[in-house]
Image (tube, grey):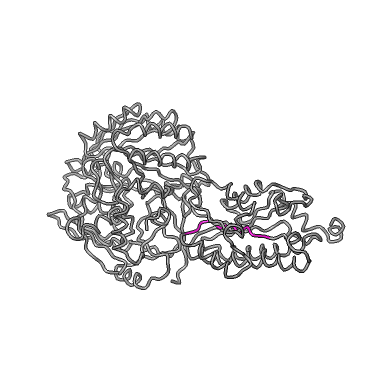
Amino acid sequence: MDEVLSSSTGWGRSIHARSFDRSENIVEMQKTIRSIGGERGALAVGLRRSYGDSALNSGGLHLSSHQLQSVSMNPTSGVIRVGAGLSIASLETIALRAGYFPAVVPGTGFVTVGGAIAADIHGKSHHKTGAFSSMVMSMKVMYSDSSVRELQPTGPTSKHFWATVGGMGLTGIIVEAELQLSPVEGNHFNVHEKRSCDLNELLFDLKTADLEHDHTVAWIDLSGSYCGRGIVGMGDFAESFSKKFRNSPKQINFPLKPKGSLITPITVGAFNSMWFKKPLNSGTSSVRAFCHPLDGVNNWNRVYGEDGFLQYQFSIPDGEEEFLFTVLAKLRELKAASFLGVLKRFGASSPGYLSFPSPGWTLAVDLPVSIPNLERTLNEFDAELVNRKGRVYLVKDSRLRAEYLPAMYPHLNEWKEIRDEMDPQKLWNSDQARRLGLC
Amino acid sequence: MLNSFKTPQRIALIGGASEIGNAVLRSLPQDGIEEVIRFDRQTSGFDAAIENARREVVSSMFTKDLDVAIIAIGALGNQESTTEEANLLRVIEVNYLATAHLLYLIASKMVTQGHGKILVISSFAQERPRIDNFAYGSTKAAIDFYARGLSHKLKNSGVEIKILRPGFVLTRMTQGMKPAPFSISAEQAGKIGAKLLQGRSTIAYAPTILRYVAIIFRNLPEIIFRRLG
């Protein structure tokens, strides 16, 4: 390899890697894989929205899925076959034009289909639809011997399929996927919101909203008194077509490149108080405004300054709500304010060995890494999560200690066995895999 | 791997008994450290003077990714050997030959893994030859020179070389000697070393004021400098 090392970072910009970056088509990828040497291996990467080091491979090869953008669709069945490099935003546009919509879309449209499978991502619809893998009918995966094989959720290839779902790209390169889209009549969402004054009320409102709506999520105010007040957002796909939402809205660039973080208890406190009191949304909303609210601003991650930030997302089963109160109290103690606190209920889990969602609650919190004692506190949270049968989400993680992983992911050993069978050469690797001892 | 707090996961300390080396370790944030590997003569039988021992030790460090290596071997010379000639050979062997070789070997491995930090302990004595420690100072000047050059060479590799230049540190090595001005404890030197490892700069003096003292020290006319000595 005579390329120059390039520097890349996770979405949180708090963790960096130097590696060899290439963007190739399938045939070129196969050739590269056959010729690859050295001990650092290769990793497929997409749009780099994972927060930490799951899409970083220091000293090794990054194979971008950018060129894998093929699309072919059966307009009567709603089955679409797409290249793994296609973004969810593009998938939504293509699907809507044919009168369909993906049942599961994440909080940003800027993730690839390959990444969505590798992290088994979830969206606001999880309580009804499950995770992204529930839409995947089959996928083509490039193995480390350069063969491309078709994997299905049932039958003889199912083990490899479910090891690749949530497998963080460590089983092979997902090159293509066949997805079942859901038929829709409209092109936008009917939405409404409800304010909840404390955490108990918020939990109750979110539970109630889940019974009636297909898409639910709660914003939680992590500042000031940390009482857990917030806004529950509810949405359902509209049954009518509106011209207003025909074109996707424009994106603006985050205009600053601050050295230090602009996220401080004072700025967040002011923003959150204002946001909590904003007029509640009721009526219609574009797909992006409802599903991907942060996509309107490009590079918003720069707001955290040069040191960057992390997202701590965990899930806990029903009955362990007490832990959410503990988290609020501890964050208050740390003066760790966040403008992005997202609470959501999960429905049934998928059969993916390392799939994150499991029935109960999930909380995601964006925090600047510069908060004093944050590392120790998050480690304490992890220890508590293990006691409560909770887990952290790997695609957001950049600091979990390896010792907690087996308890959080009880199928880890089975996954490792299948992984070794799929990749006997141990070609696929990532910095996260090294940090957590996944490979 | 370093996590998002830049906390190292695996650290190697070469010269495992070094007081400064251990103080640096203690001053690093402890929450993410999973493994510290120590190499020294007493407990692991590592003799830095043996070329093959250095090779073996370095390859044994890299069974997994290594985030930080602290090279803290060193000889002052005057206490360990009796003759001036033996002193000279001993300080060259440990402070320059062995240290530079270890630095080279570790850096090469870290370049392959695409990341890593190496702390080298230089000395204020490398600033200018003084009558009481110029042999020692010359070896520190040599390793400092090599480390600076290597640091420059590796600037785009993801590997960082950090150079700590302590003044008089009150340790076993300096026991019985008359403390020089600005002398500090190993603990204080360790704090500065840890900060250097986590920060962006390449070189740090311990105590930090020596940075300015060094400027005067280097620029004094020889005729005055000799009288001071």
- Residue A12 percent across, percent down from the top left: 43, 49
The quarter of the picture where residue A345 lies is top left
Q: Check if residue B69 falls in the magenta segment.
A: yes
Answer yes or no: is residue A240 visible: yes
Residue A285 at x, y percent in the picture: 27, 40
Which of the pair A78/B109 is nearer the observer? Answer: B109
Asked which quadrant contains residue A233, the reply is top left
Quick check: A394 left or right of B4? Answer: left
| Nearer-the-camera pick, B67 or A396 | B67
Q: Which corner quadrant holds the N terminus of chain A?
A: bottom left
For the image, the number of numbered tags is 0
Near-viewer residue (B26 or B43): B43
Q: Residue at x 26, y 37 (%)?
A: A216
Q: Is residue A326 left or right of residue A195?
A: right
Q: Position of residue A57 (x, y in %)?
A: 42, 60
Residue at far left of view = A76
- Residue plotted at (36% across, 55% down): A47
Residue at image position (75%, 65%) is B87
Camera-nearest residue between B20 and B182? B20
> Is residue A92 in sight in this rendering?
no
- When asked about the image quadrant of residue A432, the answer is bottom left
Q: Is residue B68 above or below residue A238?
A: below
The vertical placement of A307 against B220, above or below, is above
Residue B226 lies, with reference to residue A324, above or below; the image says below
Q: Main secondary structure of the magenta part?
A: loop
Give the residue displayed 27% in from the left and 44% down from the top: A287
* Region of the chain picked out in magenta, as a range: B65-74
Q: Quadrant of the C terminus of chain A?
A: bottom left
Whether residue B84 appears in magenta in the rendering, the answer is no
Q: Position of residue B46 (x, y in %)?
A: 59, 63
